[in-house]
Image (cartoon, rainbow, N blue to C red):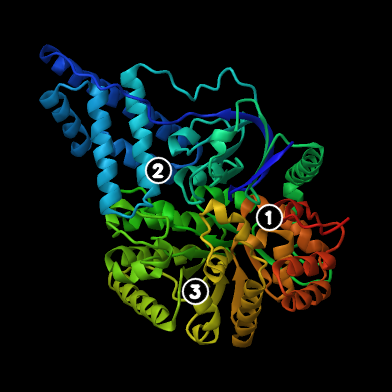
């Protein structure tokens, strides 16, 4: 009998395989002391273990740089720096010398202290930082205890699905995408460093699965759907059939990807649709182009800051923005300003503890309060405007005052660049993300100050439905087809059209056939999705008639609940469009 577990999508794609559990946990360390004459030997053993871990991480960084690029490889810098950090090294050596603890026990104590300090002095959701620290702890302790690497996959055949409590960037960097078919974890978020690396390598991943790693056994059959955030254990015949159909369709699209990329993005009745890509790393730009992206609808910039001990400089940021702008010369590139807070906490900001981080000091609120960080980013983006149609996207805007303050700071940075004789394109555009009910309700006023709207449906759903999108227990309640969400999309679209500004959708709902159909029916004709989803989305768009989409959207707007919304949309879609994902995720019998 099959078992279905819902989590959250972290990297698109579907895969079938056999479970390979990775017990990447902190090993148990016995409480042992050594004779006084052995103390310096233990200090030396600790130094050798640090050197070994550092060598391994530097090797992984080098390999990542060769495969993805220097900016992406910097994900390993915080861990490498930690190995030489005085608080780590001297603290451990002091324990060895003063208490005669073994090197392993002393290092374990020091790590526990640091974890406790970080949890007390910063937000408890400093996931990336703690994730990095734990990775370091495991590596050094295993060396000191003489334990083998649990990640040895040399004796395993292909199509492995790695199931773990959590993963780290250094683990992902060791996976061979030809051998590892997918990833499934109890913890983690879509913005975890390891999840970003998984997406850049095209490995499907689902996070937030609760206790999944305790419910599986090695070699158990498993299906991972990274598109909708679901895993199926011991799939039955129906699960296998659905999976095979979806995999077959995706493989066909992959084989045809370059042909599909060349197809015009237009509905069956002639409406042009802008299909753009969401990016997490500059290295993804080439794949986005290959998959037919007509620009970048959402370039997330947090990879430049999360996990860093110091702020990224202007030159480093400029190079990252320029790289993407040049890859899409002639097409729009929407660069989102740092969306920090929530579940993204760079160490150098010393963010205070917040009871409700997603409702707290986050996104534009952080930027306006941290001009030293913000102005460097604005200046770097302005410089990149010379290399393409760069547009600036402000996250989590709630009122016009925030937009006005961003514009004022941009003008000041423009003056600075002129004084320094540095070129920029004054024709750039500034837009806002519509992610809260407040922004949606205030859209008419915001439209007076913004050049465009981009609707972030992930957060809009979260804030409208009061459902934490990282809480696995609430995954089923996170429904983008709730009538209240649909009506806000409709309202924002009408306001934007009346104001004569572009409105696009960059949330994950746009990557689904029902979601894209709904957006087109609401006259939102610019969609931005993860690049692997582009070919399938283009196929769907080319099958749709705007007349059908508008009629279905009208029925959806009159629906009483999410089920009726989805049924209204499903009835309007042509039979060629696959709806199996909706049957699976929301258990709707949409078609016989």
Q: How many other residues sit within 10 Å of disc 1, few (<14), some (14-19) or many (≥20)?
A: many
Residue situated in front as seen by the camera: 542 or 566: 566
> Where residue 113 sits: x, y (%)?
24, 39
The tag on residue 75 is 2
Is residue 291 visible in the rendered image? The answer is no
**Residue picked out by circle 1:** 534
**Quarter of the image where one finds residue 526:** bottom right
Left or right, 288 with reference to 118: right
Picture layout, residue 412 above or below residue 505 = below
Left or right, 43 with reference to 386: left
Mark 1 and mark 3 lie on one chain; the one further toward the N terminus is 3
Q: In what quadrant of the picture does the N terminus appear? A: top right
Given the current orientation, which residue lies at the most extreme front position? 1
> Where residue 30 sits: x, y (%)?
29, 21
**Secondary structure beneath label 1:** helix
Residue at the (50%, 35%) spot, across then down? 172
Calculate the distance from the C-alpha at mark 2 to the C-alpha at mark 3: 28 Å
């Amino acid at each position: 009998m099959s078992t279905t577990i819902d989590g959250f999508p972290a990297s698109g794609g579907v895969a079938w395989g056999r479970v390979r559990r990775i017990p990447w946990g902190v090993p148990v360390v016995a409480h042992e002391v050594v004779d006084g004459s052995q103390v310096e030997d233990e200090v030396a053993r600790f130094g050798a273990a640090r050197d070994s871990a550092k060598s391994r991480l530097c090797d992984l960084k080098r390999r990542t740089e060769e495969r993805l690029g220097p900016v992406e490889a910097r994900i390993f810098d915080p861990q490498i720096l930690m190995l030489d950090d005085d608080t780590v090294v001297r603290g451990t050596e002091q324990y060895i010398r003063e208490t005669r603890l073994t090197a392993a026990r002393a290092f374990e104590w020091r790590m526990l202290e640091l974890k406790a300090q970080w949890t007390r002095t910063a937000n408890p959701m400093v996931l990336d930082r703690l994730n990095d620290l734990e990775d370091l702890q495991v590596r050094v302790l295993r060396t000191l205890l003489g334990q083998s690497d649990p990640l040895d996959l040399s004796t395993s055949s292909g199509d492995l699905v790695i199931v773990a409590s959590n993963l780290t960037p250094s683990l992902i960097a060791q996976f061979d995408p030809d051998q590892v078919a997918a990833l499934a974890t109890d913890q983690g978020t879509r913005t975890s460093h390891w999840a970003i690396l998984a997406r850049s390598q095209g490995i499907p991943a689902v996070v937030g699965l609760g206790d999944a790693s305790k419910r599986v056994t090695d070699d158990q059959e498993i299906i991972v759907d990274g598109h909708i955030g679901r895993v199926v254990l011991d799939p039955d015949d129906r699960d296998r059939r659905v999976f095979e159909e979806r995999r077959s369709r995706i493989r066909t699209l992959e084989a045809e990807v370059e042909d599909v990329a060349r197809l015009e993005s237009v509905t069956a009745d002639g409406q042009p649709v802008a299909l753009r890509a969401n990016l997490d790393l500059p290295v993804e730009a080439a794949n986005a182009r290959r998959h037919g992206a007509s620009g970048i609808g959402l370039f997330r910039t947090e990879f430049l800051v999360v996990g860093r001990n110091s702020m990224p400089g202007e030159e480093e940021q400029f190079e990252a923005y320029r790289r993407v702008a040049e890859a899409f010369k002639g097409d729009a590139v929407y660069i989102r300003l740092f969306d920090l807070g929530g579940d993204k906490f760079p160490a150098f900001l010393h963010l205070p503890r917040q009871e409700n981080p997603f409702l707290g000091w986050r996104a534009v609120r952080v930027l306006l309060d941290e001009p030293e960080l913000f102005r460097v980013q604005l200046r770097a983006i302005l410089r990149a405007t010379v290399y393409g149609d760069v547009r600036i996207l402000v996250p989590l805007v709630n009122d016009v005052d925030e937009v006005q303050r961003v514009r004022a700071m941009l003008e000041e940075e423009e003056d600075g660049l002129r004084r320094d004789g540095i070129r920029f394109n004054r024709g750039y555009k500034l837009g806002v993300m519509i992610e809260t009910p407040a922004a949606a309700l205030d859209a008419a006023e915001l439209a007076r100050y913004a050049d465009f709207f981009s609707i972030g449906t992930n957060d809009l759903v979260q804030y409208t439905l009061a459902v934490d999108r990282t809480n696995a227990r609430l995954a089923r309640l996170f429904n983008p087809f709730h009538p209240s969400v649909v009506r806000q999309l409709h309202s924002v679209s009408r306001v934007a059209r009346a104001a004569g500004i572009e409105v696009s959708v960059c949330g994950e709902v746009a990557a689904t056939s029902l979601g894209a159909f709904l957006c087109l029916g609401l006259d939102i004709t610019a969609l931005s999705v993860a690049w692997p989803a582009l070919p399938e989305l283009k196929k769907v768009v080319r099958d749709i008639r705007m007349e059908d989409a508008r009629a279905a959207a009208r029925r959806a707007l009159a629906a009483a609940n999410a089920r009726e919304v989805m049924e209204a949309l499903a009835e309007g879609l042509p039979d060629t469009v696959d709806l199996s994902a909706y049957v699976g995720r929301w258990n709707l019998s949409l078609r016989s």
